Amino acid sequence: MVKFKVVSVGCGIIANEWMKNVLSRTDMEIVALVDIRKDSADAMAERYGLTCPTFTDTATAISQTNADVVFDLTIPASHFSVCTTALKLGCSVFSEKPLAASMAEAHEMILQSERSGKSFSVMQNRRYDPNIRAYRNLVHSGTIGKPGYIGADFFIGAHFDGFRAVMDSPLVLDMAIHTFDQARFITDTDPVSVYCHEYNPPGSWYKGNASAICIFEMSDGSVFCYRGSWCAEGVPTSWEASWRVTGERGTAIWDGFTAPYAEIVAPREQKDKFIYEYSRVESDYTWEGNLGHAGCLDEMFAALKEGRPAETDCRDNIKSIEMVLGAVESARTGRKIYLKDFS
């Protein structure tokens, strides 16, 4: 069995999510931990019973361990440095989202991946859920006909401290990537343009804009509308968001918690009715993969072994980060952004 030697870079909160999902794997081992604060790396090693060395420098850790793979679990501003260092030293990279902090960095990281011949994929854990897979199948099966509208609501009162509390655009830059990527996954479409209005509502505990409304035109002509807030107290949506996709013959619904369903025009004569009658359709699609981070890691490692791009390969995922950075640019300038010009 192939056993990959992994250097894990960044020992903050998100690293715990990765550690609890990888330490039971038999196809890899953590050979080093890296953090700019060595005591953080030492503490993580102790927390998980790891006997590997700890470092403050990624290049040194790779060279001293002959690693194959780097986990980039650092803050977004550090992704470019960690990723390009790893790729240049012959390691594949599995990165926390977002892919990069700017489009220029994203393009350069992809170029480095292609030059090195190494894999570079991004954690999009919210694709790995049986309900979103069933919802995608409802949309793609033709049950509701050709989609014209995709709507996602995300309203949660998340009391973060740390870098999110002081970011200029905490919701769009740090969280909306999940929902934007889900929209691409559910509909199998890519963004064409975006108009975004960001704001910070009364009662917000964030320094930057914690709420946003975004309107995307997608590649099939449909419209994706995102409404979100990270400082919305009461009646929270799921972290997976609440979804509505409307097509020619009906609508598919997923509340982010339970199984999705659709309502379609009932198959009987209704031409004289003002409001038609509808029939409910349950999804019969099943998916038995692992959930969340574990599911995405399964796909990343499988792709590496099979020599193919992962589902969340950088060359695909750049379209999701393009939605994020395009939305930020739209909010900054107050205008609609055509993403082919922006990227």
Image (tube, grey):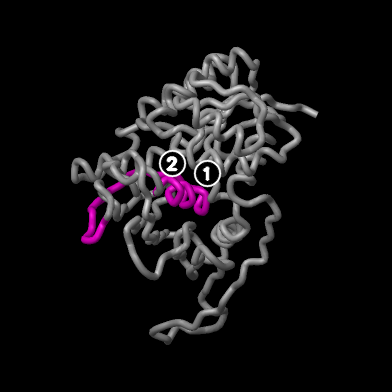
Range of magenta residues: 176-204
- Residue 188 image point, x, y percent: 51, 48
Q: Secondary structure at mark 1?
A: loop
Q: Quadrant of the N terminus?
A: top right
215 versus 68 height, above or below: below
Type of the residue with mark 1: Gln
Depth order, front residue of 154/28: 28
14 versus 252 height, above or below: above
**Residue denoted by label 1:** 124
Q: Which mark is residue 320?
A: 2
Q: Quadrant of residue 80?
A: top left
93 versus 276 height, above or below: above
Q: Is residue 115 magenta?
A: no
- Residue 52 image point, x, y percent: 65, 25
- Residue 187 image point, x, y percent: 50, 53
Q: Secondary structure at mark 2?
A: helix
- Residue 210 image point, x, y percent: 29, 52
